[in-house]
Amino acid sequence: MKRKVLRLSESFNAIKGVNLTLTESTSKELFEDPLKSVEQSKRWKIKSAYGDIGLKYRDDETIAYVASRMPAVYSACYRVLCEVRRRLPGFSPAKVLDFGAGTGSAFWALREVWPRSLEKVNLVEPSQSMQRAGQSLMQGPKDLPLIHSYNSIQALNKDISKSEREHDLVIASYVLGEVPSLQDRITIVRQLWDLTRDVLVLVEPGTPQGSSIISQMRSHILWMEKRKSRKYEARKSKDTNKETSKDLVTLRSGVHIVAPCPHEGRCPLENSGKYCHFVQRLQRTTSQRAYKRSKSEPLRGFEDEKFSFVAFRRGERPRERWPLDGMKFDTLKEQHAKRNPEDLEIDYEDLLRLQAEAEVEPCKKEDLVNYESDEVQDDTVDSDKDQEKGEEETIPADLGGGWGRIIFSPVRRGRQVAMDVCRSIKRDGSEGSFQHLVFTRSKNPTLHRLAKKSLWGDLWPF
């Protein structure tokens, strides 16, 4: 089993090397005129679901994948789908397409995030070994949605009618990087977008190559929808007799990004030497501990899975009020100046009484089990947590703009917190920027307190 896991890891590294050989000229040619690649990539439609696929999962690779990689892929998919649910509280997908389903990692994450809304799930996986492994894992649980497996998108389109091809949610996780052809990736994503009624989610490993794939697909879908919008506007201006039909088409056109990007502009991390990715910690299973190798030190009980993702939604970005509009934050000196002098007065009688109660003999101190101060402190902490939880439930972060994304882990040095934030700089979300922000307690104690509690990947209201 250890040898199988090692060979699987070597296969992933080989595919990574193929991705690195894609020249910049090919990428530039595609994004100047992406339609040129459509004719060249038709060949993969007949051969397989992925085209010239770099890794064909057989029984050995499937067993190694379940033992070593499936828990990490599941954790990343679960984290991404939870983020989509937080950003879209009213979104409950009933019909889902899982492209590159593998052994069902994304399916189990979907079932965990939306257990009651799922009605039908279509799985596309060309590897028969992967399909068998996924089906064997689905035999035990009850109350599963209706599940259909297909070898390719073409088989799915032939089996169902044209009116039923659209899905509420389409997800492709850890699959585009296994296609060593940029033309095929673009064709696949175009087809997945055509099968999407509402939300499309793409997930790749959190490596420079995986982040580059996500960035390329992000740019292509945004370019494609902007091109459609311009065509619709041009037709609408020429023909005024069909305003109703044109308005219906315009409602379907357009796209905005649910997560992680707070805007639809050019990625500000391009040509910066940095790449957008996030991290999810998971507990290692017994199989991972047994079959994953380590050079000298024993494996830790957990691992950090790095991933890159993007979630699209059809339609224009809603226009909402920005979170800090009309708010004024006082400095620490201004807050001290506004304090009530009566609050600073000390009641010496109460102070002496408390000091007298605190002077207890050592022998009696050992007999005490529960301390009143500890109980009071726990109550206050719980009340604060309940209050924060209630505020999060009543005041969610809307998609209207203004909420940035913390890209890397915040750095805390003394009384200041530094963080890198990707944020929108225009109200319509058409342009964004990458900023390095520093918060100190003296200048803005409110935002400094929030920055101390923030983590990598959190939203930031600025």
Image (spheres, helix red, strand yellow):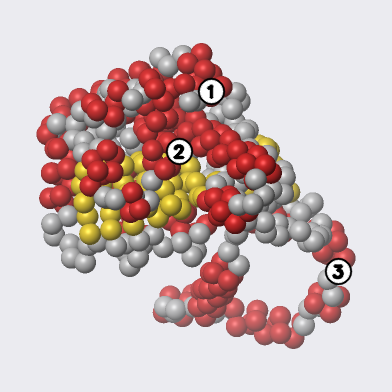
**Position in image of residue 182 (x %, y %):** 41, 23
**Position in image of residue 387 (x %, y %):** 57, 73
**Element class at badge 3:** loop
| Circle 2 crowding by C-alpha within 10 Å: few under 14, some 14–19, many from 20 | many
Task: Identify the residue under disc 2.
Answer: 308
**Position in image of residue 354 (x %, y %):** 65, 81
Residue 398 in the figure: left or right of residue 52:
right
Chain-order first, disc 3 or disc 1: 1
**Element class at badge 2:** strand
Observer-nearest residue: 317 or 380?
317
Of circles 3 and 2, which is in front? 2
| Circle 3 crowding by C-alpha within 10 Å: few under 14, some 14–19, many from 20 | few
Which kind of residue does numbered mark 3 sit on? Lys
Q: Are marks 3 and 2 in contact (CB under 8 Å)?
A: no
Task: Identify the residue under disc 1.
Answer: 33
Please say if 336 is above or below 45: below
Which kind of residue does numbered mark 2 sit on? Ser
Q: Is residue 9 visible?
A: no
Chain-order first, disc 3 or disc 2: 2
**Element class at badge 1:** loop
Q: Residue at x 79, y 51 (%)?
A: 443
Q: Residue at x 67, y 49 (%)?
A: 240
Please say if 280 is above or below 361: above
Q: Quadrant of the N terminus?
A: top left
How far separated are the C-alphas under marks 3 and 2?
Answer: 46 Å
Q: Residue at x 64, y 52 (%)?
A: 241
**Position in image of residue 238 (x %, y %):** 67, 42
Which kind of residue does numbered mark 1 sit on? Asp
Task: Identify the residue under disc 3.
Answer: 338
How far separated are the C-alphas under marks 2 and 1?
Answer: 26 Å
